[in-house]
Amino acid sequence: MSSSRFVLARLRWLLAVAALALPILPASGGDLADSLAAPGPYTVRVVEDEWRDAASGRTVPVKLYVPDESAGRNMPAVLFSHGLGGSRDGGAMWGRHWASHGFVSIHLQHPGSDESLWRDRMLSGDRAGLRDAMRGGISVRSAMSRVADVKFALDEIARRADAGDAVVSRIDRSSWVPGVLHIATEASDGAGAGLAEYLAELQIPLKTGLAETEVVRRRTPLLVEDAQRDPRLFRPLIELGATPSYVAAPIIVGDRVIGLLHADSYVSGRPLTSMDRDMVQVFADAFGRAYEHAALREWVAQQHDRIREAFSSAETSMGELDPTVVRLSRATAIEALPPIEVERTAVEWRCDRVLTLREQQILTLLATGATNLQIAARLVVSESTVKSHVKRILRKLPAANRAEAVYMFLRMAGRTQPQG
């Protein structure tokens, strides 16, 4: 097959893959245009990385525009390939816009036909070298390399989706306690079973110098590229799990780190990168919000149950009371009090200049021997309101206690003679 036919065949294959990746769109072109013209509902996270193609020996820089977790897990993808002399920074506005509508936008940079063709030569003024470099960038070999980069990127995306081991741990005071372990199907061997058994009763103190201690303290994700040699790690766990590298991220609820999320690539064996670290942090953030939401729903449900139980108990207690006795007792207690009359002789004394009319009424009832509860019922106020008025009366007169206040009231009202 000639080079040109090979390139066309690859392009047809890529178009077929792109068609399969497209979501179901509205039938009406006008509806589609209206729905995609404005920014979408999702916030966008930008991740930069470099992917190594071992087959070709090329390192492909990539930039990903990823919608937030509310877009779901099965998100359609857009693969953006720049033109001659471009870079992964090209199409940034489009990438953000697509991601805001729920697409993962993957922007590749093709070595040999990217900005390296002109950047240094443009700065140095080497016009002849710039012309030759640009011509080399449009060769058949360069075009085939660009197509190979696209295929590699698609394969890499699928490979990065391969599951490895994952552990969700909780932070219990000053200890890291592994909880839930996920082992990929391909890794479910004797070693995996031994790891699960070991984690079941494990508590790891978060000591100074431990990598996970820094994750909790700084609330930042961690990338361990060489777990077998890194001195900051908990060695028994690393040796039992035979982990070559891993990433970890804090699970945060409110202002507190409640747990850790660890993941590795045990199945694929590929080296982990900063993109894996950032993606695990995105998942940990979503996990934290989901946990917080679930905890809040559980708390609300418990409060509903308690309120329902309290009302049920009150209703049962009310049903056991004799309403006739209650009415008679209340009526007798209130009717036994004399009418509230503040005599003019009392109004003319010093209390009239110190106490309000309500305080004079309360003091008059106190002089009859009424309790706070009886006064509250008579004046149709709460018992706490009566107590507040009594405190103010004692402070204004001034009097040391209720008895002294009543004595001062009776003496000033002319109902008792001062002792001489």
Image (spheres, rainbow, N blue to C red):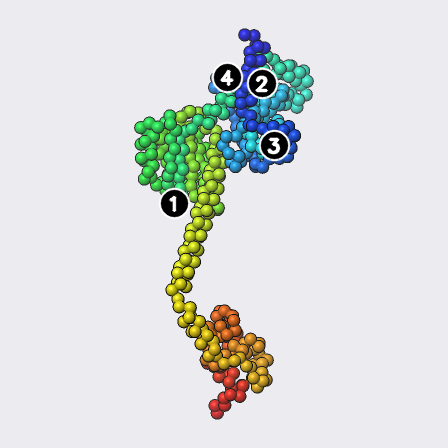
> Tag 3: residue type?
His
Labels 1 & 2 near each other (Cβ < 8 A): no
Q: Nearer the viewer, mark 3 or mark 2?
A: 3
According to the image, label 3 marks what residue? 97
Query: Residue 112: image x %, image y %?
Result: 58, 18
According to the image, label 2 marks what residue? 112
Labels 3 & 1 near each other (Cβ < 8 A): no
Q: CA distance from mark 4 to mark 1?
A: 48 Å
Q: Nearer the viewer, mark 3 or mark 1?
A: 3
Q: On screen, 297 above or below 330?
A: above
Labels 3 & 2 near each other (Cβ < 8 A): no
Query: Residue 75: image x %, image y %?
Result: 52, 30
Q: Nearer the viewer, mark 1 or mark 2?
A: 1
User: Circle 3: is it few (<14), some (14-19), or many (20+) Cα within 10 Å?
Assistant: many
Q: Residue at x 46, y 74 (%)?
A: 331
> Tag 2: residue type?
Gly
Q: Residue at x 64, y 33 (%)?
A: 34
| SS type, badge 4 | loop
Q: Quadrant of residue 171?
A: top left
Q: Quadrant of the N terminus?
A: top right
Q: CA distance from mark 4 to mark 2?
A: 13 Å
Q: On screen, 120 above or below 210?
A: above
Q: Nearer the viewer, mark 4 or mark 3?
A: 3
> Tag 1: residue type?
Asp
| SS type, badge 2 | loop
According to the image, label 1 marks what residue? 172
Q: Residue at x 60, y 19 (%)?
A: 113
Query: Residue 62: image x %, image y %?
Result: 55, 26
